[in-house]
Image (cartoon, rainbow, N blue to C red):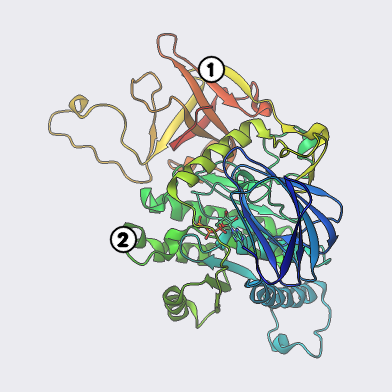
Amino acid sequence: MDGKGQTEVNIDVNTRQWNLEPGAEYRFELDPCTSLAIKLVYGQAEIFGAELAEGNTYLFGLECKAAVYTWQGCTIEVTGLPSTEYVSDETPMHAYANVHLALEQMRVRALRVVHGSPPSSDDEADSDPNPDPPRVLILGPENSGKTTVSKILVNYAVRTGQDWVPMLVNADPGEGGWAVPGAIAAAPISSPIQTSTPATTLGCAASSAPTHISSNGLLPLSYWYGHAEMKRNPLLMDRLIRNLGENVSERWDHDPQGRVAGLIMDTPSSFAASSGAQSEHRHSLIKACVDAFRINVILVVGHEKLNVEMQRTYGNRMAVVKIPKSGGVVELDASYRERVRKYQLQNYMYGKVLQPPPGLPTKTYLQGGEQTPDQTLSLAPVSSIVGFNDLTIYRIGEETMAPTSALPIGATRVVSEMQPLLVDPAQPGSGLYNAVLALLAPPNPDESERYDEEILDLPVVGYLVVTALDIPNKRMTILSPNHWQGSLMGRTAIAGSFEWQE
Ligand SMILES: Nc1ncnc2c1ncn2[C@@H]1O[C@H](COP(=O)(O)OP(=O)(O)OP(=O)(O)O)[C@@H](O)[C@H]1O
């Protein structure tokens, strides 16, 4: 397993020291129920663009797969036994860094205009009186490393020392981003996103944590799609992408500094599928992203055909650039993705608690770089009992559970993909037991501004799980992050196809 850019020294049965040459990368994969600790002993190192601090120990778990890359060379100490570990000196990091530099120039030029500063003499694009900050769409097939590239580019932007706060947009509902699977979301990123588990792959959201723990958490703006796969309801997906884009540009109207940092948008692999059911709607969804976020750079990760296709469609109005896929990207199968979704929900409700690997004392470590007092980020969700009429629950565009025999003779069920349908928890087979629900922001207080499909356009304020249904007494038990306590009465929630059981 030895690459030529490294040497490995065993310290004890559980701990090894790796000396990495400049440009080399230590890659690891963890099995379920194992953890790994990495300490930067000497030199410079980063994980997907987030720097490690010398002398600190970082914990990884929940089947994390990642890599420690070094530009200048380093020594790391690794404790624990990953299922796979090796060093490679073939990485696409130079190509990614070049993309970062080009995006950085766009930010600097856009900032000059905001500050009213004169253009610099060596600035090629000075002829453009209104230079745009980078708004980047990342496309690529399954397991090409899109999310990883998004993280690297955002982390490099944050690290430049210019106080950029770029927006990271996650349009992959199968991934869940900061909250739970089924969501699409955007968050302004002000400090590097750390990697420690796949349940918090884009960093920790502040939504469920008590304030003292969540002070460095993110406050994402999210909309609920409710399914992992785009083909379930592409029209809904299209609308939510446009809603998210509108919301981000409204934020930027009041935040020119944020606007010049631009955005990086990660997309689902189905946007790249050129055949099969997934491909049908992908062009309109890519267009929805381009329009809604006024995309001006498209990066295609390791896919020649898609690159040519994007060049033809968008090449005359924006930069379309093909970037290499990393050989380190791990092929994630369906059962792994299913487990990760479970970890995410567990994490959303209960927080992230990683046990150090054998050989390390139990004390305070840095989990993904976050200071974790008492070695834990455990949260205490609240279980509350609500009446069936207290919470109004809808499904979007799915058939009601009333049997066809209950319809008038000759009637057929026609349900528009965008139609909100009321779910009756009293109906056996309502599908609500263990269902994940998205709690929506309150509707417009001004009655005259209301409209039929308003709930499609309301952002999500938190996620809930129905843990018990008591049909005779018309009550249900809801598990929710603690700060929703007592506030579910009269609220509206949406069910999708995700379930969760502890
Ligand atoms: N250089 C690397 N070394 C080790 N693991 C890596 C490396 N790059 C990416 N990975 C891991 O490979 C997995 C897949 O990467 P990633 O999620 O970025 O791909 P993707 O294209 O976004 O996936 P999807 O198919 O879900 O759209 C992740 O677990 C990621 O942490």
Q: Residues within 10 Å of mark 2 (few under 14, many from 20)?
A: few
- In percent of width and height, residue 22 lies at 76, 72
Horizontally, residue 33 falls left or right of residue 373, namely left
Q: Which residue is mark 2?
A: 276
Regarding residue 464, the answer to whether it shows in the image is: yes
Labelled pair 1, 2 in contact (Cβ < 8 Å):
no
Quadrant holding the C terminus? top right
Q: Residues within 10 Å of mark 1 (few under 14, many from 20)?
A: some
Q: Which residue is mark 1?
A: 386
Image point (63%, 55%), residue name = 28
Question: How far apart are the two marked residues, 1 and 2, measured between alpha carbons?
Answer: 43 Å
> Along the line of sight, which residue is nearer the eye, 401 or 144?
144
Kindly identify the amino acid type of the residue bearing the numbered disc 1: Val
Kindly identify the amino acid type of the residue bearing the numbered disc 2: Gly
Instruction: Tell whether circle 2 marks a residue whose Cβ is less than 8 angstroms from ligand 1.
Output: no
Q: Secondary structure at mark 2?
A: loop
Q: How many badges with numbers are in the image?
A: 2
Q: Secondary structure at mark 1?
A: strand
Horizontally, residue 227 falls left or right of residue 196, namely left
Quadrant holding the N terminus? bottom right
